[in-house]
Image (spheres, rainbow, N blue to C red):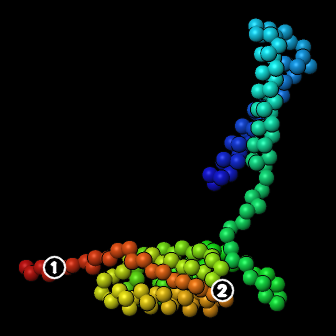
Amino acid sequence: MAKILDRLLLFVYSLSIGILSVIAILLLSGAIPKTLEIENGPAAYITAIVVAVVLFLLSIRFFYISLRRDRASLPSVDQRTEYGDIQISVETIENLSLKAAGKVKGIRDLKSRIRVSQAGLEITIRAVVDGEHSLPLLTTEVQRQVHDFVQETTGIPVADVSVYIANLTQSPSFKSRVE
């Protein structure tokens, strides 16, 4: 929504500055009859025309930017098969890795980040653990699950799965109350 509003504001701004600069150019060049008296003489006229022309050129550029479509698509991993091209977005791979890591018992509050390298995908998982399981076993299981699931599902080689344990959840302690 903010991007649409920014483009609308840029459109209105560029249009208004463009119109004002055209009017200034026409007034200063004498195309529109109006008596303008500038005390500094021809140098001030030339400076005013140059400023108006620069503003006009900037407004044309901003107008173009406000109307053009975004050609930059979301980052993706491209593959070529015997049947054609396949593009899998990085966001899809992040969601697949979160799904795989979420299957491991004892893992909570997951976040994923994907980098594409020559060797394959480099996946970083940030997790909060419950503290009731062995951390080396837990992280190894997360790495294995994510590696296997993403590689089998997408067909893209996974070069590395890094697991960052960000915190430990505190299990609620309940005191029994005797009355």
State which quarter of the image contains the C terminus. Answer: bottom left
Q: Is residue 161 left or right of residue 71?
A: left
Residue that appears at 70% across and 48% down: 7
Mark 2 belongs to which amino acid?
A: Ile
Mark 1 belongs to which amino acid?
A: Lys
The disc at residue 175 is: 1
Q: Is residue 114 above or below residue 8?
A: below
Q: Is residue 104 visible?
A: no
The disc at residue 156 is: 2
Q: Where does residue 117 sit, x and y in percent of width and height?
A: 63, 77
Residue that appears at 27% across and 79% down: 171
Dot 2, crowdedness within 10 Å: few (<14), some or many (≥20)? Answer: some
Q: Where does residue 111 sit, x and y in percent of width and height?
A: 48, 74
- Residues under labels 2 and 1: Cα distance? 50 Å
Q: Where does residue 154 sit, x and y in percent of width and height?
A: 65, 86
Q: Nearer the viewer, mark 2 or mark 1?
A: 2
Residue that appears at 80% across and 10% down: 41
Badge 2 or badge 1: first in the primary sequence = 2
Q: Is residue 24 left or right of residue 145?
A: right
Q: Where does residue 107 sit, x and y in percent of width and height?
A: 40, 83
Residue that appears at 44% across and 91% down: 141
Q: Is residue 164 left or right of residue 28?
A: left
